Amino acid sequence: MQDYLDQLDINQYLPGAIGVATNILLAIVILIIGSWIAGKVSKFIRGMGEKHENLDNTLFKFLGSVARYVILAFVFIAVLGRFGVETTSIVALLGAAGLAIGLALQGAMSNLAAGVMLMLFRPYKVGDFIDAAGRFGNVTEIDLFTTILETFDHQQIIIPNSQVWGEQIVNHSHHPVRGVDMVVSVAYAENTDEARKVIDSVLAANANILQDPAPFVEVETLNDSSVDFRVRPFTKGENYFDVLYSVPEQMKKALDAAGIEIPFPHRKVIMVNESK
């Protein structure tokens, strides 16, 4: 009789035990497969950044991590569902928490979104000289939230990416050859052909100025007290500032040596004697 009762108890609890064991086994399988898929997806996304040199690897590392955690979150919800937990409320709770976090970190999320766009479209890269957000400098670092510039006087400027992406960006290093715009003025009494010869000779003697494309030298403006030449020599990007800050002095010395006057504003005053 006792054996019959024991057998009856076993039969009573056996289906429940098998169900629990099955759910545990399936949960373990889901965890293993989900973790494997998450790792593979993360590795694949990271590998895309490593294969393409023109793409920023930092972005793909971040996207790979995000993809991994998103997949693991769904795996965790699926495991809870195997044990009868109502997952709808969990998903709603996670959504509400995500919305609250997003609102609290609105500024950071804006910088993150801008950082993603900068890394995708790559308007500049590390080592470029840029004008951005009212600042000029050499790009030393780009991450998902900020762009770091170094100025000529060795200041470090950290700019939030949202400010960079929302404004005009001027990349001075994009093209390997740059035109250097400057204005050279001579007096009205001077011969413009002779002045042009002096300017051409200065440009030809400068080792940093390219002859192909040829420098542009033409009269641009007839000002109140001067004839203004637009002078645009071309140089390699790394020599841009050398040319910009050295050639004007060379022009001044050459024009002085040739006896060509560089004018300054004059004002003629006529006095009338009205005492008669």
Image (cartoon, rainbow, N blue to C red):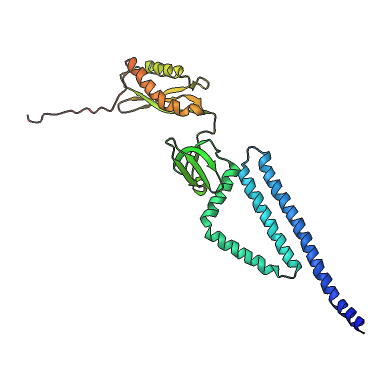
Find residue 225 and report its horizontal and vertical position in percent. 30, 26
Name the foreground residue: 58 vs 133. 58
Find residue 90 and report its horizontal and vertical position in percent. 66, 67
- Screen quadrant of the C terminus: top left
Q: Hey, which quadrant is residue 28 in on the image?
A: bottom right
Residue at the far bottom: name it: 1
Name the foreground residue: 193 vs 198. 198
The vertical placement of 11 against 58, above or below, is: below
- Screen quadrant of the N terminus: bottom right
Determine whether, in the image, residue 29 is placed left or right of residue 88.
right
Q: Hey, which quadrant is residue 272 in on the image?
A: top left
- The residue sitting at 41% across, 23% down in the picture is 247
- The residue sitting at 89% across, 82% down in the picture is 5
- The residue sitting at 77% across, 56% down in the picture is 33
Name the foreground residue: 256 vs 222. 256
The vertical placement of 170 against 192, above or below, is: below
Find residue 68 and report its horizontal and vertical position in percent. 68, 53
